[in-house]
Amino acid sequence: MTLEQVHSGWAEPTPTAVLVLADGTVLYGHGIGAESQLAGEVCFNTAITGYEEILTDPSYAGQIITFTFPHIGNVGTNEEDIETVSMAASSGVRGVVLRTDVTQPSNYRATRHLDQWLKARGIPGITGIDTRALTALIRDKGMPNAVIAHRADGVFDIEALKAEARQWPGLEGMDLVPGVTAPQRYGWDETPWEWGAGYGRRDDGKFHVVAIDYGVKRNILRLLAGAGCKITVVPATTPAEDILALKPDGVFLSNGPGDPAATGDYAVPVIRALIEKDVPTFGICLGHQMIGLAVGGRTLKMHQGHHGANHPVKDLTTGKVEITSMNHGFAVDRETLPANAVETHVSLFDGSNAGIALSDKPVFSVQYHPEASPGPRDSHYLFDRFVEMMGKHKAA
C-alpha cells in the first residue's frame, strides 16, 4: 500500500464544537453537553477536583470556564454536589472548555456521566482544546469575550460567531444577580455532609442569621447552620427595613456574579443601613466587594481574575497562611478604602486585597470562598469568627 493510499483512507473527525474569541481566534474541538450557542467571558480555573461544584456556582454566571487540569469528568456527577440552591435552576455558566474527552464515571457516588449532566443543565462544552495555550493567552491578554457553540453536524457560521463574540458587551457594568438570586424568602436547615451519614438537619439555632442572596452557594448555608445558626435567606433586593424586621443577630452577604458596582446600585444602600444599625455582618466574595463599596471604596476589573482551589492567602490578624478556593474577576481597590476599613487578608499570588474588617463596627468580609466547596477547609474558622462576633454583640 502506498503512502497516498494510506492517507486517502484516513478519516479526520469532524469538529462538532467551536470556541470563537472576540479577537477572531477560532478553536475547534469535539462537542459535549447541550447543543447550543452562548456568549460569555472566558476564564481559567486551576482546581483539580470539584468541577461539579464549580459548574453550579452562581458566581460563574456569564462565564465560560476553562479547566487547566486535563482530566475533568472522570468521576462523573451526582445530585449531592450541586451548589445552586435550586436543583433545577441553571447556575448561569455559559460553557466549559476541556482538554481531553470525558471518560466513563469511576466513582461510587456517580449517578450520571458529565455529558448527560451538562445536557440536562443546558451547558455546552468543547473538548480537545489545548487548555494550557488558552490559559497562557488569558494570562497575557486578559479574559476574552467569546462564543462557544456545539452542533452535532459540525456546521458553523464562523463569521457570524466572530461578530457575536465582538459584540457581546462583557461583564463590566453588568448586574447578573437578578438571574441567580432567590425569588422569595425561605428558611435553611441543612448542615454539612458527614461520611456515612450525608447531610444533616438543624431544627433551630442559637443565632438568627439573615442571608442576603446574591447567588449563594449551598455549602455556605450548611456551614452557617453547622456553626449554630438559624438561617433565613432573602432575595438580593430586600429592603433594609424588611431585614431588620426579622430581628437578625447577624446578616450574611453572599457570593455572586457580575460587576459589583452595578449590583451596588441597589445593594449598597441596604448594607449601609445595616452597618449604621451595628448589625454584625459577614460577607464573602461579592458580599465582600459590597461591603467595600458600602464604606466608600471602589472595585476594579482584574486582568485574569482568581479562579481555583489552591490560592494562598495570609491572615494578617494571625500571621497564618491558608490555602483557599477563589472565584472572582473583580477586586476591592485597597487604595480607596477609608481608615476604618482595616485590611485583614491578602492574596500571596498577586498581593491583592482578600479581606477587610471595620474597626468601629461588627463587620468583616473575605474575597475568597471559605466554605470549601470545592477546595480546602483551611478557612472554616471564619464561620466560627462570625458566630463569636454575634455572641459578643448580643451580650453587650
Image: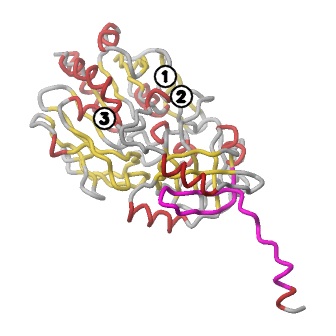
Q: Residue furthest bottom?
A: 2
Pick whichever of labels 2 and 1 is earlier in the sequence: 2
Residue 49 is left or right of residue 108, and the answer is: left
- The residue type indicated by label 3 comes to Ala
Cα distance between the residues tagged 3 and 1: 20 Å
Would you call the spot at circle 3 few (<14 residues within 10 Å), some (14-19), or many (20 or more)?
many
Who is closer to the viewer here, 238 or 319?
A: 238
Of circles 2 and 3, which is in front?
Answer: 3
Relative to 9, 370 lies left or right: left
Q: Do the residues under discs 2 and 1 have CB atoms within 8 angstroms?
A: yes
Q: Amino acid at mark 2?
A: Val
Residue highlighted by disc 3: 261
Res. 120 visible in picture = yes
Where is the N terminus found, in terms of image quarters?
bottom right
Q: Nearer the viewer, residue 23 or 202?
A: 23
Residue 313: percent from the left, percent from the top?
29, 51
* Residue indicated by mark 1: 182
First in sequence: mark 2 vs mark 3: 2
Q: Is residue 351 above or below residue 133?
A: above
- Pick the quarter of the image with the C terminus: top left
> Tag 3's secondary structure?
helix
Q: Name the amino acid type tagged 1.
A: Ala
Task: Tell me where the magenta segment starts and ends, as one range.
Answer: 6-32
